[in-house]
Image (spheres, rainbow, N blue to C red):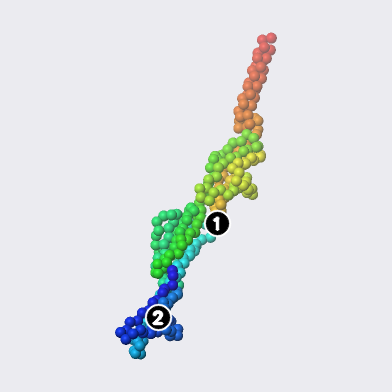
């Protein structure tokens, strides 16, 4: 990556010769010492003249000097939100070099083996670190470049809820757990009986106050990539103290039955006594 130095020397039995040269159609000059040739593809012409005035045939050389490394860029096909892509993306690499040209363009993913780039790279779910660099024909390699691509095309899931619930009280506490292995849970929302969804933040529980009857609850989870997962279940509320599914279970009914039986038995005994009298 340094300029090229050109040294000229002429030999003749009759004595020292004069050397004339020019670079890229510049004016002819007399050679007095080493010449520095900068970047580019140059045409260098020269000839020598001996003390008697005899001139050698014109000589010419092409000098190609490449002082700069190539440059590679990465472009990503896909739409992201908050830094996340929600479907597999294509990463394309392009390398350029103004002088000697590209000799190689290589890449690797997550510290794996270096591979020659041949076609668009597909990156699926996960956080992938893509490294790449180009080298030119002159042997220069640019510093390794890196791009991080985050892809999450899978919605979160909600666990810990049964398909149906029975509640003997109007105050119903619901708990669950959200799972998202890639971008992570952003928030939860809840809807009761097809009502509007209410944001619950990151809280994985809620206390509801419901009237007697059957209620459909929908809980949905959003991950940081914007994917949505949801689940629904039915809560049946029964606060009737005389109901077998009420707050006291079948106990009031059993007690009522015992009382009725006792009353009936008492009436029977009273009638028998009256008949004996």
Residue 12 in which image quadrant? bottom left
Q: Disc 1 marks which residue?
A: 83
Observer-nearest residue: 9 or 147? 9
Residue 102 in which image quadrant? bottom left
How many neighbours does mark 2 have within 10 angstroms: few (below 14), some (14-19), or many (20 or more)? some
Residue situated furthest front in the rendering: 15
Above or below, comparing residue 275 to residue 101 in the picture: above
**Number of numbered discs:** 2
Above or below, comparing residue 269 to residue 50 in the picture: above
Q: Is residue 179 visible?
A: yes
Element marked by disc 1: loop
Residue 265 image position (x, y, % from top left): 64, 18
Element marked by disc 2: strand
Observer-nearest residue: 277 or 94? 94
Q: Is residue 86 left or right of residue 268?
A: left
Residue situated furthest bottom in the rendering: 53
Observer-nearest residue: 206 or 45? 45
Residue at horizontal 63%, vertical 24%? 255
| Front label number (2 vs 1) | 2
Q: Is residue 90 visible?
A: no
Residue at horizontal 53%, vertical 51%? 183
Above or below, comparing residue 122 to residue 189 in the picture: below
Instruction: Check the picture and name the quadrant holding the C terminus.
Output: top right
How many neighbours does mark 1 have within 10 angstroms: few (below 14), some (14-19), or many (20 or more)? few
Question: CB of mark 2 within 8 Å of CB of mark 1?
Answer: no
Observer-nearest residue: 24 or 149? 24
Above or below, comparing residue 101 to residue 194 in the picture: below
Residue 99 image position (x, y, % from top left): 43, 73
Q: Disc 2 marks which residue?
A: 44
């Amino acid at each position: 990556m340094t300029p090229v130095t050109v040294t000229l020397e002429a030999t003749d039995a009759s004595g020292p010769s004069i050397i004339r040269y020019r670079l890229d159609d510049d004016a002819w000059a007399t050679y007095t010492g080493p010449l520095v040739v900068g970047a580019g593809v140059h045409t260098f012409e020269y000839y020598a003249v001996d003390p008697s005035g005899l001139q050698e045939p014109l000589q010419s050389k092409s000098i190609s000097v490449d002082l700069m490394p190539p440059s590679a860029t990465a472009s990503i096909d896909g739409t992201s939100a908050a830094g996340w892509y929600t479907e597999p993306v294509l990463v394309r690499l392009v390398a350029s070099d103004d002088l000697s040209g590209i000799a190689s363009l290589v890449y690797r993913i997550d510290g794996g083996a270096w591979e020659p780039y041949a076609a668009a790279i597909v990156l699926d779910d996960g956080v992938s670190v893509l490294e790449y660099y180009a080298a030119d024909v002159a042997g220069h390699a640019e510093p390794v470049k890196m791009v991080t691509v985050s892809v999450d095309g899978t919605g979160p899931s909600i666990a810990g809820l049964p398909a149906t619930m029975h509640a003997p009280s109007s105050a119903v506490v619901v708990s669950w757990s959200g799972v998202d292995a890639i971008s992570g849970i952003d928030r939860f929302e809840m809807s009761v009986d097809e009502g509007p969804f209410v944001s619950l933040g990151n809280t994985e529980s809620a206390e509801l106050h419901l009237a007697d009857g059957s209620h459909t609850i929908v809980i949905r989870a959003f991950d940081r990539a914007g994917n949505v997962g949801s689940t629904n279940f039915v809560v049946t509320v029964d606060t009737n103290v005389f109901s077998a599914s009420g707050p006291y279970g079948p106990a009031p009914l059993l007690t009522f039955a015992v009382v009725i039986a006792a009353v009936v038995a008492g009436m029977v005994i009273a009638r028998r006594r009256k008949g004996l009298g």
